[in-house]
Image (cartoon, rainbow, N blue to C red):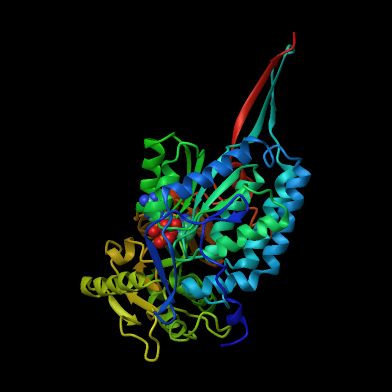
Amino acid sequence: MHEVATKAEVPSAIRPFINGRFEDSRSASQVVNYSPYTGTALYSFLAGSTDDVDRAVTAARVAFDDGRWSEAPPSFRQRVLLRFADLVERHAVELDCMDAREMGKPVSVAFCNSAMSAAFLRFCAEAVDKMSGDVLVSDVKSYISQRRVPCGVVGAIASWNFPAFVALLKVAPALAAGNTVVLKPSEISPSSALQLAQLAVEAGIPEGVLNVVPGIGADVGKPLSLHGDVDLISFTGSTPVGKQILAAAGQSNLKRVVLECGGKSPQIVFDDGVRLEVVASAIAASILRNQGQVCSAGTRVLVQKSLERRLLDALAARFQDVKVGDPLDPQTTFGPLATRSQLVRVKGAIEEAMSAGATLEVGGTEPYPHHDGYFVRPTLFSKVDHRMPVAREEIFGPVLAVTSFDSAADAVRMANSTDFGLSATIWTKQLQTGLSVAKKVRCTVSVNTGEYSGEGARFASTSEPAGQSGFGAEGGIAGIQSYQRRQTISIFHG
Ligand code: NAD
């Protein structure tokens, strides 16, 4: 074991963190978590219960209603959130190791790691005293203002693919907006969320403001989304579960819902002088980091026919050039999938693509020798018809489907031909092509860059999904405002 690995300790226990302290779960069933790297059992914990959720929501409700956070001076909220960000940064290695150990994200991958989470938290903290409302135009005898107020108790339900980052993607704007929170991390990766809650208390966030209930979807996520005292559910996860959350909101108290769900994001490549090496590296990075378990991964390539073969060769070389290994080893660039069921699902999707007639360029289902964990090879398919499942359905693994097109109109049609609408990337030498295609694709678009780039693009920009990728703003000031509602106060002063 190398040095960083020894820091990957699970906190004293995986238990509910309510009112600033660990409590026992009142659940009768257990969850066993396995190491994705070895396939052996790591630890077990209780699956959570409606009673755990009730206790956490009550704590968050009391903390909201007595104003210890929502009515505290903005300078206080800002100061402790900045201190929280400092602590997250200081504990970033430890948090990354917890996530790597539980779900396999290599510690070498900076994308959405804990240092980035701390930077996002700092952005939200800085915004606390810069938020404003409106004073409306009115007649001379009245005064009409609209202020933004917190929604109340926020239930945050997170996915496992970037455990610490996704937790803070919800907790940071919810707290910056003045709410209290009950966070339900994924059962696959609960440790970093519990560590974050302890750091929040250490930073000075009052007890009861951030509570965490670990457990499974049926026993914790469902009662949280049905709870009559939760005012907003912010969910990151799959589209099918997102639909259940929306139904639960309707069945219960009509709580607000923010849904960040699945994707099938296109990478559109024009043969108009683009730099093949740059494009191939960016596309490979997008689908291979975190083993393709990224909601916005560019999982399908639409390439102009004349460039197809050269791009496939450049991609194949990169797919074979990964450093496979222990996610806790800083040299590893490609780790295992998170769970055995992920492995079964991804292998099934590869087999389905082959039987549908797609051409396997590299990869496939053959296991890596000397690796017992949940590994699957980076897999590249060509000759993919855009109607095949491999081009339409979210696989959530390192599987890339390449389809060729003749005209920009074809590319746009295929780009929009899934149920999803999360993100797209366009590679072109002609800015006119980039902009005109971007305007026709129904999601967040990057042109000639693998990630958002440029100042302001990282945390200040807002993503808003389309179609069955969900709805609601995340990131930027608008993302903080997702956790607020407008209150109008009109005064007739005569
Ligand atoms: P998932 O939908 O299986 O689980 C997400 C969370 O919901 C977990 O905490 C789970 O326990 C909980 N849950 C399960 N059933 C529930 C129920 N009936 N009621 C309430 N909660 C329930 O998703 P996952 O496998 O954890 O994550 C992968 C998915 O997340 C992918 O589809 C990916 O695209 C998506 N994702 C989206 C974004 C985004 O920003 N759009 C970001 C990351 C991940």
Instruction: Farthest residue to the top: give it.
Output: 494
Quadrant of the frame with the C terminus: top right
**On screen, residue 170 above or below 256:** below
Asked whether residue 490 is in view, the answer is yes
Image coordinates of residue 351 in percent, x first then y, are: 25, 75
Query: 362 and 437: which one is in front?
Result: 362
Tell me which residue sits at (67%, 69%) in the image: 91
Query: 315 and 366: which one is in front?
Result: 366
**On screen, residue 112 above or below 370:** above
Quarter for ligand 1? bottom left
Quadrant of the frame with the N terminus: bottom right
Image coordinates of residue 479 in percent, x first then y, are: 59, 47
Tell me which residue sits at (54%, 41%) in the image: 58
Image coordinates of residue 197 in percent, x first then y, are: 61, 57
Instruction: Farthest residue to the left: give it.
Output: 355
Image coordinates of residue 160 in percent, x first then y, are: 47, 63
Query: 6 and 249: which one is in front?
Result: 6
Q: Quadrant of residue 37?
A: bottom left
How many dots with numbers? 0
**On screen, residue 278 above or below 142:** below
Is 458 displayed left or right of 14 in the figure?
A: right
Asked whether residue 264 is in view, the answer is no
